[in-house]
Image (cartoon, rainbow, N blue to C red):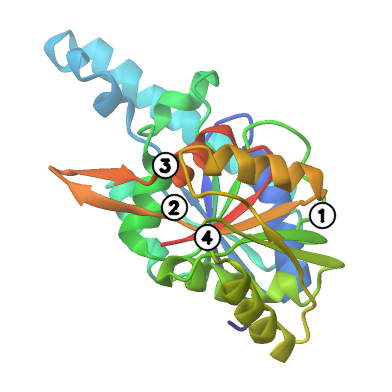
Amino acid sequence: MQTPGSILLHLDSSARTPERIKLARQLASDFGAEVFGQPCVLTALVRYPFAMEGAAAAVAILKEMDQDCREKMHTTFVELAGSDGRLHWLEPLADGPWGFARQALYADLVILGQHDPDDPAGGELPADFVSSLLLESGRPALVLPRTGVIGPVGRTVLVAWKETREAARALSAALPWLQRSDSVHAVCFGEDVQAPLNSLRACLKVHGVGLTMHAGGPEDAEVGNRLLSMATDVGADLLVMGCYGHGRAREWVLGGATRTVLTTMTLPVLMAH
């Protein structure tokens, strides 16, 4: 994949939004990309539908909450974007998360934040916003953890490799980082992992990327936890992996490792479905 030229940045009023803006500005500088900051939250009326049964004053208060939320997002974005002409503010979408998923179809990369149930603003979006967006849009997304300082991303990369289209798409999206990295590690789980790891090494060698290979052990229910543990062991600041899931009865059902990583991640994760 060529370096991303168009980055869609998710904005809300959560405590971690500034970290996403700072990273987006850094990526705009690194890759010469255009960043589009898109506010996206559920309206207060959707979050508190009982207000429709109350007085008109209650509805007015909810609309004021929406306005305050928008102003907070805009102020934060303007302050951190500064005079960088590659960062652009977009007006809020009338259809919230559904409209954001549509916008994502036109972006090379999406920047999202891990859901934080302890953040007072956590209710501004459905808890499955990140996973639904990944599975519905098919676009690669860089998901930032809900805690910790986000430093430079991509100096040491861990690739969770599996011979699937999801992992291949994530790998392709990660190439701009891999080619700039100081160190790239790859781990494969299951039996007979040497052959796919050797094939991956040959693939990356064509792109000028060296690789340290690891056999991760059995492909069981603990894969997600062992993957995050290995990321810590090798000092990774970026994890690259496929996002696995399927639709069932009007909801998305995530794969075990995908669910574990999205729930307990402690470093930025580049995912693709």
Hey, what amino acid is under mark 1? Pro
* Residue depicted at x 46% and y 46%: 258
Pinpoint residue 128: horizontal percent, then vertical percent: 37, 38
* Residue occupied by mark 2: 91
Q: Nearer the viewer, mark 2 or mark 3?
A: 3
Q: Which mark is residue 46?
A: none
Q: Earlier in the sequence, mark 2 or mark 4?
A: 2
* Residue occupied by mark 1: 152
Q: Earlier in the sequence, mark 1 or mark 3?
A: 1
* Residue depicted at x 51% and y 34%: 263
Q: Earlier in the sequence, mark 1 or mark 4?
A: 1
Pinpoint residue 24: horizontal percent, then vertical percent: 67, 57
Q: Nearer the viewer, mark 2 or mark 4?
A: 4
Q: Nearer the viewer, mark 1 or mark 3?
A: 3
Q: Which mark is residue 256?
A: 3
Please report contact status of discs 2 and 3: CB closer than 8 Å, yes or no.
Answer: no
Pinpoint residue 174: horizontal percent, then vertical percent: 63, 70
Hey, what amino acid is under mark 4? Glu
Hey, what amino acid is under mark 2? Glu
* Residue occupied by mark 4: 191
